[in-house]
Image (cartoon, rainbow, N blue to C red):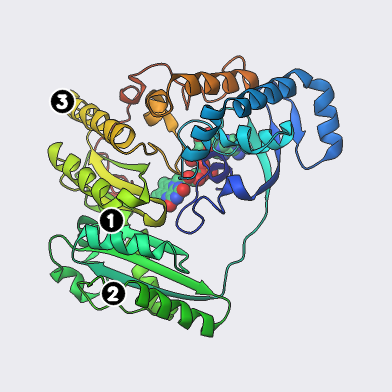
């Protein structure tokens, strides 16, 4: 799934904004809308492209100069990309780089197939340290868990995943789950923490430092790290199974929706509570929240019926409230790592403002003047696009109905 990972700047649990596709891409082979081919890792290919597509390269250089010269805009872009953000195009390419081939390499990341087809990609790999330990830390409230996340940001941790009470509940009946899951308080919140090291001694030191750092926050269950793969696999099974868990218990005929927003980490507790309140307001009782807490990146999963108009109306009201919450209250990202897609395309301008949206429209035009590639994805002037062409999931057959 490397094509989608590059095209969405998908990042997941461990890489944050430091080791994602944008940061680790070295070069790629691209097929453009007009059929032209470019290998950004090959000097001969770049020379040929310079000859055949000088106008495209000039326009990119011009846009990069304009962006850098506009200090307010450049600063806004830098600020937004300190957080995970895949709403619209990876505009940081225009402030981080000047060479048009470097810009192409990086603007393609997160472009969701709207600027060209990535036929091959070369990444700089990162080290996967061999010694790992994880702890499922259960705190009595989301505030306690979020305070722990803030402290852990300065510790040697490779992942900190938040799971809300509803998420824990959805996993409690699975085989091999810790028995205490069933007895947690109603406000309990978990963070699943992983630390890695290149030898066992450093791993133990990391664990000691982590426990010392958070010792003033009282957990609901005593905290224990384990370096046994069979034990920590159970914790990670809870986290990785959240999406299918909700899918498994969904009402027949409903679709599982997963969303992907980011908030400033310092306001994670408040934002999670606001999200939970939104679910309550719109009666999404089965919704669960989990996510990459170190990056303020929350996913939430809920089920939605698209067969009936009043259900679609409810969905519209919910999405409108969500967009206002993320953009207006938190200046967050409507999409952190899953790409804009058609669902958030109507709201790109709302998050970035008119001037930046115009810049994104310009980028699309430079690469794909006839709007051939994935039209309506990322750039979509229809403010109702997220409510059209919805795909109902009618009851079909016991075997198929389980599919999410
Ligand atoms: C259950 C589930 C869990 C997920 N968990 C995570 C997660 O934890 N973290 C995370 O970041 N993401 C996650 N994702 C989203 C993730 O980005 C995608 O699943 C994955 O990257 C899709 O890869 P794909 O090749 O199947 O792309 P597709 O789904 O086929 O395509 C995704 C987009 O990329 C474009 N695209 C695909 N290939 C190319 C190409 N070669 N050139 C140009 N454009 C291309 C498509 O046009 C489309 O717009 C999850 C998805 C699912 C379904």
Q: Where is residue 180? Give x, y as percent.
A: 19, 74
Query: Relative to residue 304, is residue 364 depicted above or below?
Result: above
Report the residue marked by disc 2.
176
Q: With 351 as the anchor, is 358 left or right in this view?
A: right
Placement of 238 over or under 286, stated as above or below: below
Residue at image position (52%, 34%) is: 75
Considering every residue shown, the one lying at the far bottom of the view is 201
Is the distance from the Cβ of mark 1 to the nearest ligand 1 atom less than 8 Å?
no
Q: Residue 290 at x, y = what percent?
A: 31, 54
Image point (59%, 23%), residue name: 363
Q: Compared with residue 55, is residue 348 higher up or lower down, i.e. above or below?
A: below
Under tag 1, what secondary structure?
A: helix
> Dot 3 lies on which element?
helix
Q: In the image, 36: left or right of 21?
A: right
User: Which residue is tagged 1?
Assistant: 245
Q: Which residue is disc 3 drawn over? A: 310
Residue 147 in which image quadrant: bottom left
Local secondary structure at mark 2? loop
x then y, percent, for residue 209: 42, 77
Q: Residue at x 55, y 48 (%)?
A: 1
Count of numbered circles on the image: 3
Q: Residues within 10 Å of mark 1 (few under 14, many from 20)?
A: some
Q: Is residue 384 above or below residue 338?
A: above
Residue 112 visible (yes or no): no
Q: How far is disc 3 from disc 2 in space, using C-alphas?
A: 40 Å
Taking the view exactly as shown, the residue that stands out farthest to the front is 71
- Going from N to C along the chain, the mark reached first, 1 or 2, is 2
Distance (Cα) linking label 1 and label 3: 26 Å
**Left or right of 109: which side holds 101?**
right
């Amino acid at each position: 799934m490397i094509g989608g990972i590059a095209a969405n700047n998908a990042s997941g649990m461990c890489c944050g904004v430091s080791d994602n596709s944008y940061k680790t891409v070295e070069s790629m082979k691209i097929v453009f809308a007009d059929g032209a081919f470019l290998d950004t890792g090959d000097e001969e290919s770049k020379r040929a492209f310079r000859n055949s597509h000088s106008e495209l390269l000039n326009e990119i250089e011009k846009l990069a100069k304009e962006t850098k010269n506009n200090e307010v805009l450049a600063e806004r872009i830098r600020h937004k990309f300190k957080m995970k953000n895949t709403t619209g195009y990876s505009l940081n390419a225009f402030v981080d780089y000047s060479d048009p081939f470097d810009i192409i390499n990086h603007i393609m990341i997160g472009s969701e197939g709207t600027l060209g087809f990535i036929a091959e990609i070369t990444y700089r790999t990162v080290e996967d340290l061999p010694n790992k330990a994880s702890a499922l830390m259960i705190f009595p409230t989301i505030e306690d868990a979020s305070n722990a996340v803030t402290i852990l940001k300065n510790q040697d941790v490779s992942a900190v995943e938040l799971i809300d009470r509803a998420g824990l509940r959805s996993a409690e009946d699975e085989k091999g789950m810790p028995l205490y899951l069933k007895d947690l308080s109603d406000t309990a919140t978990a963070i699943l923490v992983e630390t890695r090291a290149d030898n066992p001694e450093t791993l133990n030191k990391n664990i000691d430092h982590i426990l010392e750092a958070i010792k003033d926050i009282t957990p609901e269950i005593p905290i224990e790290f384990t370096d046994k793969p069979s034990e920590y696999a159970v914790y990670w099974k809870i986290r990785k199974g959240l999406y299918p868990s909700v899918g498994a218990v969904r009402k027949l005929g409903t679709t599982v929706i997963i969303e992907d927003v980011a908030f400033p980490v310092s306001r994670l507790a408040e934002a999670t509570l606001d999200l939970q309140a939104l679910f309550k307001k719109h009666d999404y009782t089965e919704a669960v929240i989990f996510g990459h807490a170190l990056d303020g990146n929350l996913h939430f999963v809920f089920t939605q019926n698209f067969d009936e108009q009043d259900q679609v109306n409810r969905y519209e009201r919910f999405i409108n409230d969500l967009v206002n919450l993320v953009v207006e209250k938190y200046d967050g990202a409507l999409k952190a790592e899953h790409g804009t897609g058609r669902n958030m395309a109507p709201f790109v301008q709302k998050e970035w403002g008119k001037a930046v949206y115009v810049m994104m429209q310009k980028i699309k035009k430079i690469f794909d003047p006839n709007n051939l590639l994935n039209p309506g994805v990322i750039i979509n002037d229809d403010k109702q696009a997220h409510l059209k062409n919805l795909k109902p999931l009618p009851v079909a057959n016991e075997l198929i109905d389980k599919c999410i």
